[in-house]
Amino acid sequence: MPNRLKPWFVVLLAAATLPLLGAGGGTSTAKTPADASKALDPAKVERGRYLTTVMFCNDCHTPFKMGENGPEPDMSRMLSGHPASVKVTGAPAFDNGWASAANETNTAWAGAWGVSFTANLTPDVETGLGAWSEDEFVAAVRSGRHRGRGRPILPPMPWPFLSQASDDDLSAIYTFLRSLPPISNRVPDPIPPAAN
Amino acid sequence: MRFHLKNDLVRYSAALSILATSAWAALPALGSGDPGEGQSAPATLAETGLYSDFASRIVGEGIVAYQPRFPLWTDGLDKQRWMQLPAGASIDAASPELWEFPVGTKLWKQFALGGKPIETRYMERVEGGWVFASYAWNEDASAATLAPRQGVRAAAEIAPGARHDIPGSFDCASCHRGQKQRVLGLGPVQLAAGRTGDGPDVVELTRRGLLRGLPERFLSAPADPGPESREVLARGYLHGNCGHCHNSEGPLASLQLDLRMEIDEPAGEPAAIRTTSGIAASTSARSAPAALRLDPGNPEGSQLLQRVGTRDPFAQMPPLGTRVVDEKALELLTAWVRHDLVQPTAAASETP
């Protein structure tokens, strides 16, 4: 494989394959939320765009591809999470003090928690956040739980830091995410740690 | 008691909690994210007024112990519950499913293992909402102090490899904000007239002047109630353990999964059957792969039972507050699905 990807703080490579991927943005199977026609506040969208950019949400939630200058986020699949087509079957072995690793797309992360996959944050109803209300989104960030009351959100998602954002900032981030084109991409379930 | 605790899942849960808690606890608090609806809670349990004599744990005068009909499973821990209303005040039950508690109401739920208290959860009604808190008892049970907002992980080992976590403030909100009524376990179904169990029912609360306005038809117990049917017990379990999130009015209403029981249930199929039996599951997980929420006659193909019967943190239900499967409840629900639930099509064909 030419030009092996080295995303920031990738310390090991997970056992992953990277098939050829077509552009994923706004696929035909994506379903927009029922309130998609509701006008979004442009100022809020821009504030959310700014926050998601400087808080590097794209670094994990937008899959990396190999560009002319090395690995870069594939913005045609912006914030759509770990691509379902990229199969990861387990974590690499850790030794010599290493504790975590990411795969080539920077969307699958291995550590003591097993392997986690970054979520699809686009407003696709079936596979993204399209069915989530703003309250649920804010509660998820604040609590570290799916929709604010379900399964735990795994590392390395830095929700304990993000949870301290202001209500206005989280609302802006949610609004910006609603403005994205929905992308149908079903992120796989996390993989528990190996038995050894 | 047999535990469904596979080693990998134990490690999984442990790793999650350690990572999440250590990161959160180390952070400087920036003042955002408090889910409380009102003022902050007292610093110690003693200050809440539960005990008139804290050292000997004598409960204060006017504080009423109660027990719900369908209690929430908390890994077999012993629980005690109390309520206190301001002097002369009462709960307004004119809206039977949405009791209005007077400002100043205090509620406590204490968790103990082998007679030793581990934590005491506390709710206080204030202007504009409720204060939620939990108090962690010290080793010699001489004091209980307000738990930090991220909770306390591994506050006690309740079984080999299974520990009890004291919930964080957002964990409180996860359950208590899942429906309009913030108080769980103290309502018309849980304290129904004539229900079995210790403590007052709605009739007794009314007689004592602690409850008013509940329509008369809910204030008479059956002359000979007899044992509750398996279906009622099963639906009651779902009501007490799942219905506070899975209902038709809260944030998860869009799932169209309603596991609540109502005191005044409309005619026809109860919601807990109508929204599960033969209904496709809206999601799945590695430990809960069944396609249907409940498949009548086929508990093995019922995702709801798979979720109740696992402690894989990505599939278990409830998703928090328990690390040990409730085996008795699983048996009950399994028998209900196997023997009592009827295929919707078959049921329809029998209807004249």
Image: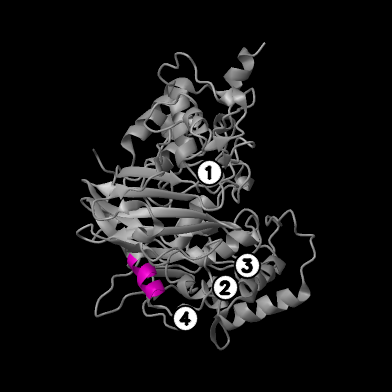
Report the number of numbered marks.
4
Callouts 1 and 2 close, C-beta under 8 Å: no
Image mark 1: chain: B
Helix, strand or loop status at disc 4: loop
Which label belongs to residue A62?
2
Callouts 4 and 1 close, C-beta under 8 Å: no
N-terminal-most mark, 4 or 2:
4
Q: Which residue is mark 4?
A: A5
Out of B132 and B171, give the one closest to the viewer. B132
Magenta residues span B18-25
Q: Which residue is mark 3?
A: A22
Type of secondary structure dominating the magenta stretch:
helix
Q: Is residue B312 rendered to the left or right of residue A169? A: left
Q: Which percent across, then down, holds residue B262? A: 57, 32
Asked which quadrant contains residue B200, the reply is top left
Helix, strand or loop status at disc 1: loop
Of the residues shown, which amino acid type is indicated by label 1?
Gly
Q: How is the image coloured?
A: one colour
Q: Residue at point 26% right, 80% down?
A: A97
Which label belongs to residue B132?
none
N-terminal-most mark, 4 or 3:
4
Callouts 3 and 2 close, C-beta under 8 Å: no
Let me know if residue B19 is in the magenta part.
yes
Let me know if residue A11 is in the magenta part.
no
Q: Nearer the viewer, mark 3 or mark 2?
A: 2
